[in-house]
Amino acid sequence: MSQTGRSERELTVEVWRGGAEGRFERYRVPARENQSVLDLVTWVQRHLEPALAYRFACRVGMCGSCAMTVNGRPRWTCRTHVGQVAKGGRLKIAPLGNLPVIRDLVTDMTPFFEKWQRARGRFSPTRTREDEPAAVDPGSKARRAADAGIECINCAVCTAACDVVRWNPDYLGPAALNRAWTLINDARDGARAARLAAVSGAAGCHNCHSHQGCAEHCPMGLNPTAAIAGLKRASLIALLKGELS
Amino acid sequence: MTAWLSLLQRLSALVLAPLVLVHLGLMVYAIGDGLTAAEILGRTRGSLFWALFYGLFVIAAAVHGPIGLRTVLAEMTAWRGRSLDRALLAFGLVLLALGARAVLAVVLPGAAP
Ligand code: SF4
Ligand code: SF4
Ligand code: FES
């Protein structure tokens, strides 16, 4: 803690402690010119609360493991500058929403990744290593649609921001559906029909209200709402053609 | 089924939008002009056009309303699944019956009110 008292600026940081039932603990952390929200959490753990549980890996916005709720908004904490979010030197840091809390700032991501599986978010190859590589025109409409969603880092920020996930925990959610849309547009993939069936069921794309909470919060600037609109369109066309099992 | 409901919801909305506008315009016209019930019935009774217009209106509304309500209830309450579907199917049939009764009353040629 600060030895010089008033001469060093401090931030008041409230951090969630405990599981689903818990409370916010208040810490005073020195303010630095350049620090991320993740740096603050790390400072608290190193200096004040060694038992504090939180998750990170890359610290440069690539791995998607550091997302938390910062002053009420889901964010990637390693790339969120404190100056951007600390109102009056105060920060309230909670675990990411719409997921079960394990402890402190760590959520259980299992339901999130299970939804990727349920939305058939895995690539189904149509060729083997014996075949020629597929020729994909980077300027084609399908490839551009796939490229628009491909940079997802699986951080679950969008899912935490989605009201429909909160109302209906079964809803596949923006990240898994965005992933499905990139695969639907992948010329090399062979599971289009099965994937369309997987994303248009009771928990699927037709639940989306298109209110763009996901797109607003996605740190990678992706637009899952547009991807889901694409899935809705594709699934209704398949339905009318009798291709939707 | 979800995809079908979604399709029906959009199609019924497409049908309802212009019908609602014409209906509202009609109400303003009828009230502003001070038409009596007898004068209105005089124009609607035996009219195939108004029979089709309001017949379609009732069908579209009976499709659109329950599907929307099903979504609202599933999201805002814990009521989901088969019992919800059955209840809303019943609700749709009630809307259809009440609507059909009203349409028949104004378009079937009959005695003065
Ligand atoms: S646009 Fe759809 S997926 Fe995105 S936050 Fe809204 S309801 Fe959720
Ligand atoms: S779509 Fe964006 S917010 Fe959602 S998981 Fe991927 S990177 Fe994160
Ligand atoms: S720690 Fe990897 S994205 Fe933040």
Image: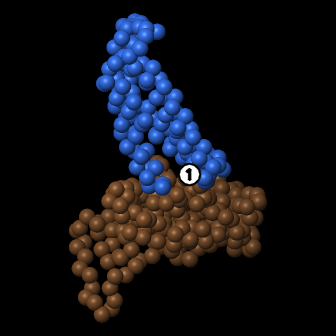
Residue B13 position in % (x across, y down): 40, 39
- Quarter in which the N terminus of chain A is drawn: bottom right
Q: Colour of chain A?
A: brown
Q: Which residue is mark 1?
A: A163
- Residue A115 falls in which quadrant of the image? bottom right
Residue B14 position in % (x across, y down): 36, 39
With A180 as the anchor, is B70 left or right in this view?
A: right
Tally of marks: 1
Q: Nearer the viewer, residue A27 or A65?
A: A65
Q: Colour of chain B?
A: blue
Which amino acid type corresponds to the residue marked 1 in the rendered image?
Asp
Packing grade of label 1 (10 A; few <14, some 14-19, many >=20) is some
Would the CB of label 1 be found within 8 Å of ligand 1?
yes
Residue A76 position in % (x across, y down): 53, 64
Q: Nearer the viewer, residue A122 or A54?
A: A122
Q: How is the image coloured?
A: by chain
Which residue sits at x=35%, y=76%? A189
One can see residue A36 in this view: no
